[in-house]
Image (cartoon, rainbow, N blue to C red):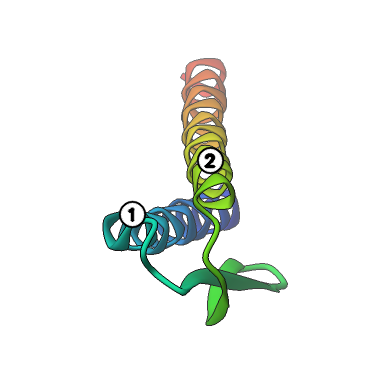
Amino acid sequence: MNSLTNIAASGLRLQQQALQVTAGNVARGADAQTRQRLESASVPGSGVIASGVTEQPADLAADAVDGLQARAGFQANVRVLERGHDALGSLLDVLA
């Protein structure tokens, strides 16, 4: 269960970082020439990490999509943690 928790928690951290990068892009607005995008890498058995930030041409529509993806990824990782908690609770009920 610890591995599940670590992997989901790493996903939460990554999505939080991605949303911060996207928010910065939106705050700079339409006048910005470039936008930043968070890149990620998987770490076997540990989840994911931010592997760097790339510069790309400014695109507010892409920032909106990135923000939605970060939100969906965050929600998915929260659900993983909830299901893991539920499974552990069920196991403890069986063992009691």
Mark 2 neighbour class, 10 Å CA radius: few under 14, some 14 to 19, many 20 or more = many
Q: Residue at x 51, y 46 (%)?
A: 70
Q: Which residue is drawn at 46% across and 19% down?
A: 96
Distance in Å between CA atoms under marks 2 and 1? 20 Å
Left or right relative to 13: residue 95: right
Q: Which residue is drawn at 48% across and 69% down?
A: 35
* Residue 90 position within the rendered picture, expressed as x and y whole percent measured from the top left: 54, 18
* Residue 77, numbered circle: 2
Residue 38 in the image: above or below residue 68: below
Q: Earlier in the sequence, mark 2 or mark 1?
A: 1
Left or right relative to 1: residue 85: left
Amino acid type at circle 2 is Asn
* Residue 40 position within the rendered picture, expressed as x and y whole percent measured from the top left: 62, 71
* Residue 84 position within the rendered picture, expressed as x and y whole percent measured from the top left: 54, 33
Residue 22 in the image: above or below residue 39: above
* Residue 23, numbered circle: 1
* Residue 61, numbered circle: none
Mark 1 neighbour class, 10 Å CA radius: few under 14, some 14 to 19, many 20 or more = some
Q: Residue furthest left?
A: 27
Which of label 2 and label 1 is nearer to you?
Answer: 1
SS category of the residue bearing label 1: helix
Q: Nearer the viewer, residue 56 or 37?
A: 56
In the rendered image, which quarter is residue 3 located in?
bottom right
SS category of the residue bearing label 2: helix
Residue 37 in the image: above or below residue 95: below
